[in-house]
Image (tube, rainbow, N blue to C red):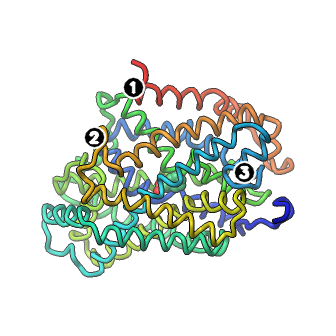
Amino acid sequence: MGNLDLMPRDSFGSKLGVIAAAAGSAVGLGNIWRFPYVTGQNGGGAFLLIYLMFILAIGFPVMLAELTIGRRAQRNALGSFRKLAPGKPWYMVGMMGIVAAFMILAFYSTIAGWTLEYLVQAVTNSFDGKTAGELKTSFEKFQGGTFRPLVWQVVFMFLTGYIVFSGVKNGIEKYTKILMPVLLLLIIVICIRSLTLPGAKEGLVFLFKPDFSKITWPVILDALGQAAFSLSIGMGTLITYGSYIQKDNNLPVTALQVSATDTIIAILAGVMIFPAVFAFNIDPAEGFGLVFIVLPNIFEQMAGGYFFGILFFILLAIAALTSTVSVLEVVVAYFSEELKMTRHRATIIAAVAITFVGLFATLSFGPLSGFKILDRTIFGWFDFLSANILLPLGAIFIVVFVGWVLGKKNVREELSNDGTVKLPLLNIFMWIIKLVAPLAIAMVFIYGLGLIG
Ligand code: PHE
């Protein structure tokens, strides 16, 4: 193996490709499955407001900080820290990211597998003629099984591995560019149907009218975790992708476009789900299964619902795929650059190991559903630990690193692209990443977990 600096690195081919790939990572089950279920459990409007504040004040700056690290270092999540701070323990942040990637993919692939099951159910017209109650029962029956959920998870991990296998540009970029806009359009169509259901208004009130009595520290921590999870920040995905972004890309604009797209899709997912939740008398705090129970009800009530249902689950699976690919890429980039494996070998080892751990997450809904630690199943722990603990913790270290170690001079150099990008807000950005974001995250963390008070 030669000097890494001399080897040509794979990179994204175009500006649109960069945005498509990064937005492809951000937009996924986090928006369409996780956002509605977490919002539903945390009481709606006030949660949404706090979530939006976190996206703006913390999520966007962290995203930009991550892209800065990656493009500056031209390395994987761990190697980047090693290169920018040689001989210092900062590479541990990268290590934590690799652990988070393992954990996220392990449980994410469970839900991604569900999208495939639902695609098949849509194709075979299985929602037709069922009442809301029957749709719920049939979901629970599938979810509680062993064989089918496991098979779908394995299939999904195989697809993920296959795309990562084919490399960044040919694999990741090609697919996202076309499909993301179609998904957005389809969500809007479904929103319209949901909004015109009888009783829909109550859902809008739930989603948009803040009831501040619902706000507690754990709710705030959930909002922070959801913001981090949805933007794909805090674990090195955007360091890794940043390392494939060309030197003339305007990173602040890219970060802005990606976080805006992600946020718009999450809100639209809320508009798609909550009116229907109330129209069909489903409990908004239903939990992990919420969207899978609600969506078939909407398709059933929709002109062309058979067709839209199929299209939706295809696109949802693809949105999930562009996210799982970005998570696996973190591990594969690390294995291949730091442990000097070939890309193919790295992909196989990572995908097989993660799939194995993931099986336990999937079985948490079936045979292992009684296995709980402190009231959470294995799946519940992976979900909670990654989103609410590892990502916010990673985010603190990332911004502190960029703010205090990399420093303003390097940040300006990296973001200004030889003076072609003006940075009028650089001082505010530095101030946020040096102090505001780390302190705010630390506070939410400490109070949200009940470490103090
Ligand atoms: N942001 C992705 C989603 O919303 C999930 C993800 C989290 C991807 C962390 C990468 C890193 O589906």
Q: In the rendered structure, which amino acid carries the disc numbered 3? A: Gly
Q: In the rendered structure, which amino acid carries the disc numbered 1? A: Gly
Rendered view: 110 above or below 451: below
Counting residues from the N terminus, which is met first, the one under dot 2 or under dot 3?
Answer: 3
Question: Callout 2 environment at 10 Å: few (<14), some (14 to 19), or many (20+)?
Answer: few
User: Of all residues shown, which one is farthest toward the bottom?
Assistant: 124
Question: Callout 1 environment at 10 Å: few (<14), some (14 to 19), or many (20+)?
Answer: few
Q: In the rendered structure, which amino acid carries the disc numbered 2? A: Asp
Dots 3, 1 in contact, CB < 8 A: no
- Secondary structure beneath label 2: loop
Q: Residue at x 79, y 57 (%)?
A: 247
Q: Residue at x 57, y 70 (%)?
A: 348
Q: Does 104 sit left or right of 175 as displayed?
A: left
Counting residues from the N terminus, which is met first, the one under dot 1 or under dot 2?
Answer: 2
Q: Residue at x 35, y 46 (%)?
A: 38
- Secondary structure beneath label 3: helix
Q: CA distance from mark 1 to mark 2?
A: 16 Å
Counting residues from the N terminus, which is met first, the one under dot 3 or under dot 1?
Answer: 3
Residue 202, given in percent of the width and then of the height, sits at 23, 47
Nearest the viewer among 312 and 394 is 394
What residue did someone put label 1 on? 450
Residue 214, given in percent of the width and then of the height, sits at 30, 31
Residue 132 makes an appearance in the image: yes
